[in-house]
Every structure is written in C-alpha cells, then in structure tokens.
C-alpha cells in the first residue's frame, strides 16, 4: 500500500486525525477539494470567523460598561470592512499554517474530490489518480441546505457559507432559527448596530434537549434587553422583494428587512463519494453508520464528524477522528461518546453544556441532585463586571457521579473543561467539592456548586 | 460548650471554614476586629479591589486593539474617581452580603480582638467576654510591614493597605518589588497612564522558584513594551522629599516620582493573640506550626492561611480552613498540600502555575518530559486577539503523572483549574492527552501540550 491512511477531507476532524495518525507513526495523506478549502467549514465559514466577530461584539458590550472602570470616550465608530479584513486574516493565517505544517511533516494533500473505489482505494477526481491505503477515514463534513422556498442567493438571502461576503452591515436583518448559529449572529449584528429580528419555530431559543431551559430563558431575556426582536413559535410564511424584503410571519406581522440570514439546515456530505458503490451503509437521514470506534460497515473504512450524526460540532469530529485512528492501530480503549461532547454557544452569553440536564436525568430515571450557583455572588465575576449567569451541576444521588454540567456566563466555554475531564474519568462530585481552586476565580462557582450538592448553599445567593 | 467552633478572623480562610463547618452541622462563631474588616485583607485591601482595577487595565489594553474589530473611537478619558467608586462598591457589596448571609444562617460574629485564654476559650477584647468552644481555628491573616527606612505614610509612600486611598492617579510612580503585587500594580497604573518604574532586587520579575523563568521573561518584555521601566537587580539606596520624591537607586541612577508603592513585606498576625500563653508553637519566623491537618501543637486549636506559611494566598487559607474543619469532624482524608495550591498572577498577562517547574522537577531527581504549546497557534486565542503566551506541562516520564503546569496567557487563572483537578486526583497525562475538548477553545492548548508529551507537536508552532 502507498499509505497507511488516506483521509477524505482536511477539515477539523480530518486534520486532527491526520496529525494524530502521523504522530502515531502512520503514513498519511489527505484528499481535499482545493487549497482554499483546507480547514473545512469550521475554519473557513464557521466557528473561527464567527468567533472573531463575536469577540468584537463582546468587546463592544464591555465598552458600554467602561464608565464603571473610569473609561470614558466619545465618537464611537464601527467599521465593518476593518472587522472583516482582520477576521479573514486570522482565517487565512490558520489555513496557510495548516498546509505548511502538513508539508513540513511530509503529509501529502491531494486536491480534488475523493471518491471511494474499493475498501482500500480512493480516486481523486481533480488529479485523476488513485490512492491506495490500508485505512480510509471519511471526514467530508456537511453543507448548507436551503429551507422551503427561502433560496439563498448571497445578495439578500444568505446562508452561513455566504454571510462572510456581506461587506457592509445592513440596517435591518432577519435571522431564521434561534439555534446556536442564529443566536450567535443575532448578538454579533446587534452589537454592531443592526436591527435584528430572530424567528424560531419552537417555543424557546436553543431548543435542544441537552441545553437546560434556564439557559434559553436567560439568553432570550438578554438578547431582548440588547434590542433584539426575538419571536418564538414563529416562522416565515412568505416574502416579497421590494426596496428591501417584506416578510410575512406566522404571528400575523410583517417585517421589512434588508436581508435574511438562514441560521439553520445542514446536511452531511455523503453523496457522490462512492459510499453506495463500495457498500458503506448510511441511515435514513444520510448519515454514515458507525460503531463506537467510528468504524463503518466496511472494516477498513472509518468516518468521523458531521457525517456520523446530527451533532455537527468541530470538536466532535476531532475527537472521533482520533478514536478512529486509535482503533486502526489496535487500541480499543477510546470510544465515541456524544454524551461527553460539550455544546458551547457564543452569543450574548457563553453557554456551555455537557452531559445530562435535570430533565434528561429525570427522564432517564436517575435520582439526582443539583447544585446551582449564581455568578452574582462570585467576586471575580463582580470584578470583571460580568456577574450574570450560573453553574448547574447535575449529580447522581446514589453514586455521586457527575451526570451533567451547564454553565451560562463569562468564559463558560473554557470553565466547563474542568468538569468534562472529571466526567470522562468517572470521578464523583466529591472530587470537585474538595477541589483546590484559586481565589478569586470564576471556577470557584463550579466548586461551590459541587459543595452545595453535598452541604447546601455556600454563597449568599441561590438562583436558578 | 457554647460553640463547636470559634474562628479568629472572618477573612477568606476563616469565612470559608466557618460556612463549611456550619454546613457540616457545627455551631460556629467568628471573632473579627470590626464590621469593616469582615472579609479580611483579600476582600478589603487585596485581591478583590486589585482585580477590579486590573480588569479596567485589561479593558484599556483590549481597547487599544479595537481597530482590528472595526471599533474606533476618540476622546478617551480616564476617571480615577469613577474607577475607585465602582471598585469600592463591589468590595462593600461582598462584605455586606457576607455579614447578611452569616446572620441569616445564625452564625454569630463577635467584634473585637480575639485572644486565646486556654485550649477552649477565646477572650473578645472589644466585647469584654469569653467564648468557649470545642475547637478554635486561628485565621488571623497577615499585615504589611515596612522595609528598611521606607516608612509608608499613606501620602507619598504607600503600602498595599493605603494605596486604595489614592484619589488621583499620580504622574510618576515607583513600585518596590517585582513580585505578584508589584507587577499587578505596575500594569494597572501603566494602563491608566502613569509613568511607572519597578525596582526588583532579584534578577527577574516574579522571582519565585515555583514560577518558570519563561513566565518572568515574557512578563518583563510585555511590561517594557507597555512603557514600564523595569529595573532588575536594583534597590533603593535613599530618597529625599522635595517637590516630589527624589530616589537614588543602586544602579546609580536617580528617579523623580510622585509616590512610592511598597509591593513587598507581609508578616503573619501571630502576636498579641495569646499563642505563647496557651502554648501554641510558632517557628522562627513567627508562623504557627501545623501538621498536615492544620492542627497546631494544641489539639483543639487549628490554624489556616497566612499564619501557617509564607505562601500567603487567600485560596490557600480557604483550602486549609476546610482541611481543618474536616479533621475536627474526624475525617482524615483531606490534607494540606502546598504543591497543589495554584499561584495566579494578574498583570500584563495572567500567569498561573501549579506544581513543579522543569527546574524543580530536575532538582527533585525526576526524569521528566515537557509539553509546550504556544497560544500563537490557538484559533480561539487568535480570534480573541490574545495569542501571546504558552502552556508548559511537566510530566513524570516513568509514571506519566502530571508534576506541574504553567500557563501564561488569556484567562490562565481559570484554565489551570482543569489541570489542578486532575493532579489532585493523581491522574496521568493520558487523561489530558485523550480528553474531550471544545473547539475553538483556549483549553485545546492544554490538551495539545499533553498530546505533545506523548507524540510530538500537534500544532505548527512550538515555542518556549
């Protein structure tokens, strides 16, 4: 064989798996559509550019509280071009360094569409050649889909592939979908001065069972306070293009906006890559069927990331990629586990969840306890002027095992890691209740939530 | 006995211990000097107000990079009064809520100086009464000391008790000591426009064996870039008061400043509280001798925090306070361990350390490996415009045990907790190398440092 491993797709999952395989001694190659798509959706049209803009929005919000720190200014001006240029520079830097690093390590990238020919062969459409490898990892990711009669045109109706081309901030924007993507863009554009309407068909923002309702409620309240027009249980009936867009909503109202952003709808990229021909099984929704080692129905072919389940998160892909490689090398101790994959939402708050919510624990028949600590009584949060939010820790009452943790507030996406690691190690709540922490720190609130599970509230405010 | 536990000092250690003891079913009372000193040095004249001001400094630094986020403004004005007012409001809020919460729980606070009378009796000087308790916890903290002929007067020469009264920002300030306190104030005042000179007698900033030299170097470079005049291996020879202060330094130079801040010198509050009379043993430097359960030479008397060792950190006190209470209740599984106490410095970077540095690991005879990952290649750090710094993970080569971790960079003080918890649980580096993380996140760099220990660099930049 020419290679030990050939990976279809050099996005988050493929790239991480490739590097890991290389470090474990495998001879690795990537097949990726073009030099411009290395890094995949996350890097080029997803989490990385959006997090850049979100940081700008966060800075603007911080600025609005500057007076409390004796920081006064006037003449605030917002420059969308500068924002976009600097954002794109970060994206390009990462992408080019990805390529350089692969080159330096001797990891080959073939450009073109990779199509399975047999359990050990990939045909690269662009380069018109076949590559043979002991193992194949499918990491082809996902694509935007359109929604009903809302056809994204990149001019007035944007999907999340197209929105990066928006050169100026519109005056008024309608965002379809109050999920992770919708609420992130709602916050970004609102802080940069856009009038934003969000329509969500379900009865709450972030309508995922794995996110506690408290998080949805807190977020809706905050977005409204910032001036976002949040409409739940609402969808678009029809629209007409006039000077702008005139949109009829299911609540009977008509809103006039300059553009629409579709924050929903992605499908796995599992068509046209030879799955059917080689016999790689898919489920009814087009996802590749994998076992707990990310192995498909064909033993030499593995899959990771967006194509394995609707949980389309870059870090799920990165984790699964390494699970797959590890299994190829004969290690069976590392497994898929969606329950341990954190969901981190960056909007008007950081909202981070791992494991079960209280409702889910109840549904699964657990006797559980919960520790709830508000950042309102956390000295570091008060010092930082960001004392909104909470930690909710869900614990099995019989075993003390940590079932889930849900943080809404400052740096929630980083804070959660300390709980994820303990959950993965199967540690009990006592490991947190007796933890060493630094003072003052936001992390204290996590430790206090664990102490509360044992002993009752350790701070002066208990809030849900 | 009237009480199960009486605690001398309602500062960080005493307060945390008292709450914990209450939740474990003990009848608790505090003895504290006055209603204004509840919360101790950390809350009233230490970490809490300084972290508030430091957050303002951090905001100013963020603002200076606003253009990259399309955020432009002019007419920046700094208002020291507003800063001080808001800062003091946070401090007062925490202090008053401390008291209210204690009152609500029925925990009594006696005001006055507490003096030991016998192994179960404390005399309260202000209230002229005796309290008897099964156990006594000494949590009296520490005080500023003066240094040679530099006598703090609160007008031109300030110690860290007095600096909070400084109503306007001076034009020029000399800070004595490049330790944790000195570098924090240097950053704060510099960002608020003050010309700052820092003199440090040792050959590096943060001259602690537990902080890697890289952290000192990074910090010195950054402070200099921000315009701080950092002078190492330098001390004050003499000074004279003229219009301002004319200070002769050991490097032969003369600097003229408006005021001097003494960032060094604290002594344990172990005098005049009856230790000698009751037979509680002290060491040669005035610290109370304690065993690993924080028990003194008198079995019913325990001690925690600044009075047990020169490691004067609020969270050390909080941890030891709980160790002590736990032991009073007959649990011996929770012990003092200074090796697990994190050191977190808030200056031009956050600098967080736990456990051994590489030098210390070498000195202690370990064969160790180190994983070093720069934030320069971390996508979240790049998005946030804070890609300076590193993670250094020190691992025992034979057992895989994590010996230490040193983070310099964004939110280092929070990030470190995920490593502290694993170290406390005795987990190996593999628990981090195979961890689940979210992407993009700063925490990824920690996981990558663990992967590097095993497999070699996982990112394109390796930097020390």
Image: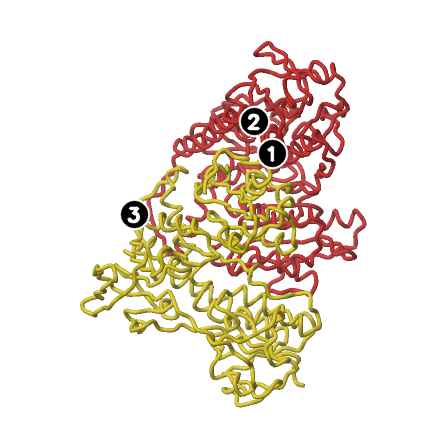
Chain colours: A red, B yellow
Q: Residue furthest top?
A: A128
Q: Whole-percent x and y of residue A340?
A: 68, 43
Q: Nearer the viewer, mark 3 or mark 2?
A: 2
Q: Are marks 1 and 3 in contact (CB under 8 Å)?
A: no
Tag 2–tag 1 contact (CB < 8 Å): yes
Q: Which mark is residue A314?
A: 1
Where is residue B261 shown, x and y percent of the image? 33, 65
**Label 2 chain ID:** A
Whether residue A158 sits left or right of residue B155 in the image: it is right
The earlier-in-sequence mark between 2 and 1 is 2
Image quadrant where residue A460 sits: bottom right
Q: Against B297, is A415 above or below?
A: above
Question: Which label lies toward us, 1 or 3?
Answer: 1
Q: In terms of secondary structure, where does tag 3 sit?
A: strand
Q: Is residue B55 left or right of residue A22?
A: left
Q: Marks 2 and 1, Cα distance to the nearest angstrom?
A: 9 Å
- x and y percentages locating residue B9 in the rendered image: 53, 76
Q: Are marks 2 and 1 on the same chain?
A: yes
| Camera-side residue of A282 and A261 | A282
Mark seen at residue A40: 2
Instruction: Say which residue label 3 marks.
Output: B75
Label 1 vs label 3: CA separation? Answer: 42 Å
């Amino acid at each position: 064989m020419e290679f030990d491993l050939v990976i279809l797709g050099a996005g988050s999952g493929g790239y991480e798996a490739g590097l890991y395989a290389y470090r474990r001694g495998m001879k690795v190659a990537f097949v990726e559509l073009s030099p411009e798509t290395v890094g995949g959706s996350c890097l080029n049209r997803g989490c990385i550019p959006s997090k850049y803009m979100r940081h700008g929005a966060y800075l603007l919000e911080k600025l609005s509280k500057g007076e409390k720190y004796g920081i006064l200014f006037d003449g605030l001006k917002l420059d969308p071009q500068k924002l976009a240029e600097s954002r794109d520079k970060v994206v390009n830097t990462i992408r080019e360094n990805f390529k350089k690093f692969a080159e330096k390590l001797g990891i080959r990238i073939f450009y073109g569409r990779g199509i399975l020919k047999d359990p050990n062969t990939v045909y690269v459409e662009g380069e018109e050649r076949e590559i043979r490898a002991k193992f194949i990892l499918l990491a082809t990711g996902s694509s935007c889909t359109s929604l009903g009669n809302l056809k994204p045109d990149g001019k007035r109706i944007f999907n999340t592939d197209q929105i990066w081309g928006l050169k100026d901030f519109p005056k008024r924007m309608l965002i379809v979908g109050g999920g992770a993507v919708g609420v992130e863009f709602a916050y970004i554009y609102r802080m940069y001065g856009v009038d934003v309407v969000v329509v969500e068909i379900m009865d709450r923002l972030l309508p995922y069972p794995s996110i506690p309702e408290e998080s949805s409620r807190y977020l809706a309240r905050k977005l409204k306070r910032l001036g976002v027009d949040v409409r739940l249980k609402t969808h678009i009936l029809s629209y007409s293009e006039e000077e702008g867009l005139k949109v009829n909503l299911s609540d009977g109202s008509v809103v006039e906006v300059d553009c629409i952003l579709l924050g929903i709808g992605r499908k796995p990229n599992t068509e046209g890559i030879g799955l059917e021909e080689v016999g790689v099984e898919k489920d009814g929704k087009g996802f590749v069927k994998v076992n707990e080692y990310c192995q498909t129905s064909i033993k030499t072919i593995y899959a990771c990331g967006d194509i394995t389940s609707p949980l389309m998160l870059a870090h799920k892909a990165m984790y699964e990629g390494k699970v797959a490689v590890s299994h190829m090398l004969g290690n069976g101790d590392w497994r898929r586990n969606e329950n341990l994959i954190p969901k981190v939402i960056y909007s008007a708050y950081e909202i981070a969840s791992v494991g079960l919510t209280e409702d889910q624990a109840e549904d699964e028949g657990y006797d559980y306890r919960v520790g709830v600590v508000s950042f309102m009584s956390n000295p570091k949060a008060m010092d930082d002027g960001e004392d909104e939010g909470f930690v909710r820790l869900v614990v099995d009452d019989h075993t003390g095992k940590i079932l889930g943790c849900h943080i809404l507030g400052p740096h929630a996406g980083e804070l959660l890691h300390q709980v994820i690691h303990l959950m993965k190690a199967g540690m009990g709540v006592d490991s947190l209740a007796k933890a060493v922490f630094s003072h003052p720190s936001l992390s204290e609130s996590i430790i206090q939530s664990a102490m509360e599970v044992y002993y009752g509230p350790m701070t002066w405010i208990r809030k849900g």
